[in-house]
Image (cartoon, helix red, strand yellow):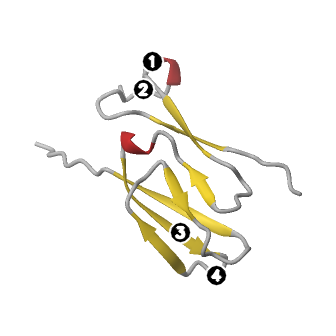
């Protein structure tokens, strides 16, 4: 069995990005997606922070599933294989004067 590897995703929460190139000057947050490889469930414990929806693509890059954000993603109906996950984030509008 393949060794499990979690994904760590780093992001700046809304309002915490200070426009600097230095990570230490902002408040970078991390959330994980696990396990990888997965059997039936993908866990995204911090999903509510900023994800608006989740898309899953097969190895041919065909979209096979689109979901509302949740802490546990049921992938039991997908056949074994390599998949890509796309996390869509909240988009905020800004105006330039």
Image coords of residue 18 (percent x, y)? 35, 25
1 or 3: mark nearer the eye? 3
Please say if the residues under marks 2 and 1 sit with CB atoms less than 8 Å apart: yes
Question: Which residue appears at 24% of the width and 47% of the height?
Answer: 92
Q: Secondary structure at mark 2?
A: loop
The numbered mark at residue 56 is 3
How far apart are labels 2 and 4 at the CA level? 37 Å
How far apart are labels 3 and 4 at the CA level? 11 Å
Q: Earlier in the sequence, mark 2 or mark 4?
A: 2
Please say if the residues under marks 1 and 3 sit with CB atoms less than 8 Å apart: no
Please say if the residues under marks 3 and 4 sit with CB atoms less than 8 Å apart: no
How far apart are labels 1 and 3 at the CA level? 34 Å
1 or 4: mark nearer the eye? 4
Q: Secondary structure at mark 1?
A: helix
- The residue to which callout 2 is attached is 20
- The residue to which callout 1 is attached is 25
Q: Quadrant of residue 97?
A: top left
How far apart are labels 2 and 1 at the CA level? 7 Å
Q: Earlier in the sequence, mark 1 or mark 4?
A: 1
3 or 4: mark nearer the eye? 3
Question: Which residue appears at 74% of the width and 57% of the height?
Answer: 37
Please say if the residues under marks 2 and 4 sit with CB atoms less than 8 Å apart: no
The numbered mark at residue 60 is 4
Tag count: 4
């Amino acid at each position: 069995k393949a060794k499990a590897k979690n994904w760590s995703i780093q992001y700046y929460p809304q309002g915490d990005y200070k426009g600097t190139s230095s990570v230490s000057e902002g408040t970078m947050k991390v959330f994980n997606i696990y396990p990888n490889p997965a059997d039936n469930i993908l866990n995204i414990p911090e999903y509510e922070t900023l994800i608006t929806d989740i898309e899953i693509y097969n190895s041919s890059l065909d979209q096979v599933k689109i979901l509302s954000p949740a802490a546990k993603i049921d992938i039991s109906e997908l056949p074994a294989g390599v998949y890509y996950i796309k996390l869509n984030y909240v988009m905020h509008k800004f105006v330039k004067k």
